Image (cartoon, rainbow, N blue to C red):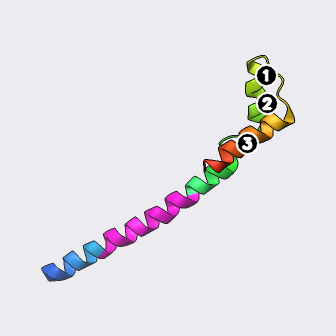
Amino acid sequence: MVEVQVWVLIVVLILLLIGGAIAGFFIARWYFKKQLKENPPINEKMIRAMFRSMGRTPSEKQIREIMRNVNSQN
């Protein structure tokens, strides 16, 4: 039977936990960026649709102003 010292087991477990945390961080970051690229938070079409649903026709100036405000908050 193989005898493993306790401190070796603890060190290996700690290294595995750190490695898993780092890998999880990069996988989550990649997935989040992919989702933002596929589904942007808001764009000009959405703003126009929102105005139309309120019964208004927005000017280009209003749309650009709203986009500038949204982008400045990111």
Q: Quadrant of residue 42?
A: top right
Disc 2/disc 3 C-alpha distance (Å) = 11 Å
Query: Relative to 55, does residue 67 appear above or below in the rendering?
Result: below
Q: Earlier in the sequence, mark 3 or mark 1?
A: 1
Q: Residue at x 20, y 77 (%)?
A: 9
Q: Residue at x 46, y 63 (%)?
A: 25
- 61 on left or right of 43: right
Q: Residue at x 85, y 36 (%)?
A: 60
Quadrant occupied by the N terminus: bottom left
Residue 32 picture location, percent across and down: 56, 53
Circle 3: residue type: Met
- The reply to whether the magenta stretch includes residue 62 is no
Circle 1: residue type: Arg
Count of picture labels: 3
The mark lying in front, picked from 2 and 3, is 3
Rate crowding at label 1 as few (under 14), some (14 to 19) or many (20 or more) other CA atoms within 10 Å. Answer: few
Rate crowding at label 2 as few (under 14), some (14 to 19) or many (20 or more) other CA atoms within 10 Å. Answer: some
Disc 3/disc 1 C-alpha distance (Å) = 16 Å
Residue 2 picture location, percent across and down: 17, 83
Query: Relative to 52, does residue 3 appear above or below in the rendering?
Result: below
* Magenta stretch bounds: 15-30
Q: Which residue is label 2 attached to?
A: 48
Disc 1/disc 2 C-alpha distance (Å) = 6 Å
Q: Which residue is label 3 attached to?
A: 67
Q: Residue at x 61, y 56 (%)?
A: 33
Query: Relative to 27, does residue 72 appear above or below in the rendering?
Result: above
